[in-house]
Amino acid sequence: MATIMKTKSLVVIAFLLALASHAAGQTPQATPPPPAATRSVQFPKPVETTLPNGFRVIVVQRSQMPLVSAQVLIKSGGEVDPAELFGTADMTASLLTRGTTTRSATQIAEAIEALGGSIGSGAGWDFSTVTTSVMSSRIDPAFAILADVIRNSTFKDEEVERLRRQSLNNLRVALGTPGSIARFAAARVVFRDAPYGHPLSGTPESVPRIKREEIVRLHDMYYRPDNAILVIGGDITPKDGFALAQKYFGDWAKPSTPLPNVTVGTPVSESSNRRVLVIDKPDAGQTVVLLARTGISRMHPDYFRGIVANSILSGYSGRLNWEIRVKRGLSYGAGSSFDMRRWSGAFTASVQTNNETGAEVASLTLAEVSGLATRDLSDTELTTRKASLLGGFARGMETIGGLVAQVSSLALYGVNLDEINRYVSNVQSVKAEDVKNFAATHLGADNSSLIIVGDAKKFLPALQKEFPQVEVIPVAELDLNNASLRRQTSRN
Amino acid sequence: MCRSYSLRTLLCAMILLVAIGGVSAQTKLPRINFRERTLANGMRVLSVIDKSSPTVAINVWYHVGSKDDPDQRSGFAHLFEHIMFKSTKNMKDEMMDRLTEDVGGNNNAFTQDDVTVYYEVVPSNYLETLLWAEADRLSGLTVNEASFHSERDVVEEEFRTSVLAPPYGKFFYLLDQKSFNVHPYKRPTIGSIEDLESATLENVQKFHETYYRPDNATLLVVGDFDPKRLDVWVDKYFGSIPKRNLPLPRVQTKEPPRTGEKRFVEYGKNVPLPAVGLTYLTPSEKSDDAAALTMTDIILSRGRSSRLYQALVYQQQIAQSTNANADLREDSGLFELTAILAAGKKPEDAEASLKAEVKKLQDAPVSEAELEKAKNQIITSQLRQRETNLGKAQALGGAAVLRGDPNRVNTDLERLQAVSAADVQRVAKKYLTDENRYVIYYLPESARSSSGSENRSQPGDQMKGARQ
């Protein structure tokens, strides 16, 4: 059965606003009653230790529900894929749960699922993870499985080939999905041939080339206790959490070799890199418009200015959705985000619209993003958008899974874990001027590219009026293996 | 669970014993302790106090859904849901966002076949404000033409986003359309662009009068609040809404039993890999067989050790993904088996594999280990749902409105845990039969043969000339 939503994009909790009420004299029922006194909120405090082998262990206890979630992060992901072998890190991570020295793929699944739990693994940018989630009464056997898949994976040929086929099938579906095509292309536009530029799961050309030896080599190089973090959240005390870590990871040997040094390089933001790219997909049921450009890294000193700036643009009542959906009915939703990574990630604004209105939405998106630097930003707008942002932050941690994800993200980037409880004040201290200055530096039109995937004949003429430099690539000629994005045609 | 014979066998046996013997003893699902009132105007109020976070989740469940869409107005209940966020007597357009998002809360709504649910989660000091707001839109809408047209455009974009853009949007749309012959469940909730374009403001007002009335509404409040104040506010804002004396229309149509297999071949513009669906007509979620059908769904496809994943994805490598879904609704339901094929595989082969799994369920009881696993999986997922106030509210709302008894939020788990291997075998034999099966192949346009009588259906069309 379908559940169809009105869906707004972002979600929320917060503490600080009083709603202005109307003047006295109107009947009470005609105006909303004002709120009662604000209640304060406490966020959980993580506790941590590091084992002698360099394995960092963090426990954040919350015992309302008898659930535990445990995640091991390896601090390396798609950015360490060998050249031309895009997808190696993701395949390596995916293979962890597909066979160890004592359990086959099926046995791993049976073991964790018999407990009512789940285990999943995969690579991201800057990290690879294995996550298990289970009732707290079952945490010990779940931990045994978690440690087994991280430490004892065998990468059998049969499983490598099985995963390869599945990965190619998944790519086939993704490359038939306008949103995925747009995101893959946007990464190439922003990062070009730098390591963040390729699709995380590889391409139809790269996946067949990945040999088992490459997977084993990547695993040997990066999967080591001094390149790993364990985060445990939920119904478990720090003492018990540390004891489990010691029991299952204490004897995980640290290699004598130094950690590999990886640098990704900062993509250069030159206006010459700016592209307006159309990928023509005549069978697309809708057009996807992406604005993409270099963003900032997670450790950038303007982190909070960045997320507040984004909150002005994104969210149900943010400027993008307001102008495109609420005022004009052109989309089911428009939003934006900074993907802040170890090195600069990308800023992306994204909208899906009817093919016929692709050009209009592209213009509106660019205007709103680049207008943040100059348009008036009132106290009311700033305050309400901050409330939305703070609410989303707190709501994201209402579940144990969300709590673990938040702590993992801080730990991965070496951010002090106390920041959870300073988040509110850090957001509140950002002023309107800060937002506009940030936008002027980081969200200008000159360096913002547009990537549009859809039935081009329906929007191209209108688009060319505003962007005469537009490039068009038919989807059959799309090549995600290089920055040009165009398959090199044979000479006839 | 443990196939390798080694020192580990003993450990495995112990774990298995613990699992079989100790599940209910080890982890209990915390009870949801709710209080119930019914106002003089017929509105039901359910509340649950939980002070673990300074927030409150408010839900209003209206017992109307897409099965109640007026004639030639498929998608209307959902369009109407969008319009409920526009102006009312005392609120201008988008005021709900001002009262929630702007103060650190959020709001949303969803429409299903049988019910429409509006919800918000706000800091608990805003409870009274949101009760006032929900009462206001229950009382009436004042939306104008411009807002109506704009929001209808949004809904049409939603149609494109969920049905036309994703490769399998149309496949799932067709499963509903083809699976019901008579009952309005055959009209997908999202409707069709054509029917949406025919909708008018008069339809909106009529729909509100007909279905948005206190005796067709259940208010749920879960979180940090004082029960005495809640009662005062509920009486003040909702108590004054008059009882409606008109009869409340209900769908009376019954979907007749199926009389033989039907087969459909459908095509899409953008189908990267073919898909296959098998659907079986089932009774409603209130049926005594509902629990066994739910357990069958879980044993078949939850997790990678599940039967469908192991057979179709892992062993045979015939499917990129596969799923079983016991989609039991208020009037009747469907048991669906679906697969998206791996490259180079034929729909006939996936169909054969799915049918083979059905036959296995019918020929032999499932194992105790599989039942125990399913029970543990259910407990874990229900624990996860109940982590949040909103999750608790939705669990309670479903029990109260769709299954007619709020206490089922606490007793449904027992029904599931009481399902035996014999029950699973029985419902497989009773419902997953050849005569009760409809088969849908979803193929790319390029696979269309030049001859003959294949369908050229578009979403929203009536079925034309289906092959038997």
Image (cartoon, coloured by chain):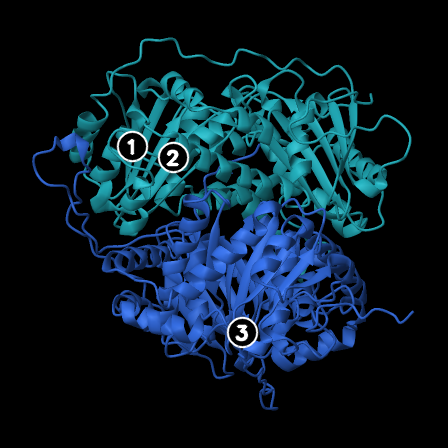
Q: Position of residue B111 (x, y in %)?
A: 48, 32
- Residue B280 falls in image quadrant: top right
The quarter of the picture where residue A275 lies is: bottom right
Question: Between residues A445 and B415, which one lies in front from this camera angle?
Answer: A445
Instruction: Write down the chain letter for disc 1.
Output: B
Amino acid residing under circle 2 = Tyr
* Residue A58 position by quadrant: bottom left
The residue to which callout 2 is attached is B118
- Left or right of B3? Residue B328 is left
Across and down, in percent, residue B373 comes to 59, 44
Q: Is residue B192 visible?
A: no
> What hue does chain A carry in this figure?
blue
Amino acid under label 3?
Answer: Phe
From the image, tell me which residue sits under label 3.
A249
Q: Is residue A205 above or below residue A416?
A: above
Residue A329 versus residue A424 in the image, above or below: above
Q: Which mark is residue B134?
A: 1
Palette colour of chain B: cyan
Residue drawn at x 38%, y 57% is A397
Badge 2 element:
strand
